[in-house]
Amino acid sequence: MSLDNPIPDASDPVSAPSAGPSPRSAGSTPAAAVDSAEPVYAQRVPHGICTAADFATWSDHVKRGVEYYYFAARTTDGRTDVPQVTRQLSAELSTLALPRDPSERRASINLVFVHGTGSNRTRLSRVQRTYAAYNRYYPNLPGRQNTPHRGTDSAEDYVDEVCDFISDIPNVVLFGHSLGGALVAGILERHPATVRGAVICGGAFDFNQLPDAFRDALREGRLDTSLAYGKMSAEDELAFDTVGPDPETERVQLQDWIANSHLDFGTPQGRARLAQLDIPVVLVSGRHDYIVPWQKSDELAQAIPEAEHIIVNDIGHMLPMMWPERVRAVVDSLIARI
């Protein structure tokens, strides 16, 4: 497992990854970062962010009951037909060779974006143009928009849904944000044959770190996120103003939080399975993420061989939406290693 030294160059808010692996003891912590006096992104609005008018032009695709958006590599038109992949043995899918040419290599990758709590496919797809070099899939988790519920809508049910969705898609790189990141960790524990790499962004969630008052309310079927978050970074406040509030109903948000409360990825058994991974994995955290503190991502990174953990200064939880170009650079770097 390798971890960047999170002391950024003055011109670069993202800490540069280390040149190679540098195993650390479980109790060690990264060096303190140098934060700017003024938030780097205080006045930033992402370029090319998609709007509701864009969503209205995109095709609604359905696969095994899961509604999703699809964008072909080198296009930003959500009306492109989804390629018909002949169902093969997963072992065959996992051995498909990638082209050596970097451009062709990217066009052979299928990015599958797994969204977070209270959200749906519209959240991460708002910055889909940033990833135009790749094929992009944006599936809904169960119980939102026209995607039906699955089982008891537990975290394991969510993982089952994504695993089914990707089972016949070759050369998958998973991208999970928030709850989606925690679910990606759960997917990786199963070692799906078609997955070639993963990016977990603000996704090492620990429900037990939340205040007792919030957890007690949730057990009573009440959702009060003000009890959960306490304070929020200025960047996250700007992010929610920019990309809008969670798009799903309070019922779905409650469903997701209950799923969060039963996340057990990272158990000793799960960590043992993660320790057997032989694909590249990168975790990305915001230094000012009060929802999923970077320290939890560091713990997860230590369980995965050769994983990188990149900590971004002066930013909070909504990094994929507010600085998509930087996150795409992480994706590009990971795919170059496949």
Image (cartoon, grey):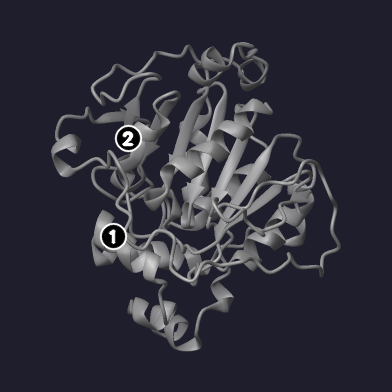
Is residue 15 visible in the rendered image? The answer is: yes
Residue plotted at (52% across, 16% down): 103
Check the image and name the residue furthest to the front. 10
Q: Earlier in the sequence, mark 2 or mark 1?
A: 2
- At label 2, counting other C-alpha atoms closer than 10 Å, the crowd grade (few under 14, some 14-19, many 20 or more) is many
Look at 40% across and 78% down and name the residue there.
218
* Res 31 quadrant in image: bottom right
Residue 67 percent location from the top left of the image: 30, 36
| Secondary-structure class at tag 2 | strand
Could you tell me which secondary element the residue under label 1 belongs to?
Answer: loop
Can the viewer see residue 196?
A: no
Q: Quadrant of the C terminus?
A: top right
Circle 1 residue: 246
Residue 49 position by quadrant:
top left
Mark 2: amino acid = Tyr
Residue 294 is marked as none
Mark 2, residue position: 68
Residue at 31 percent across and 64 percent down: it is: 238
3D distance between C-alphas at marks 2 and 1: 18 Å
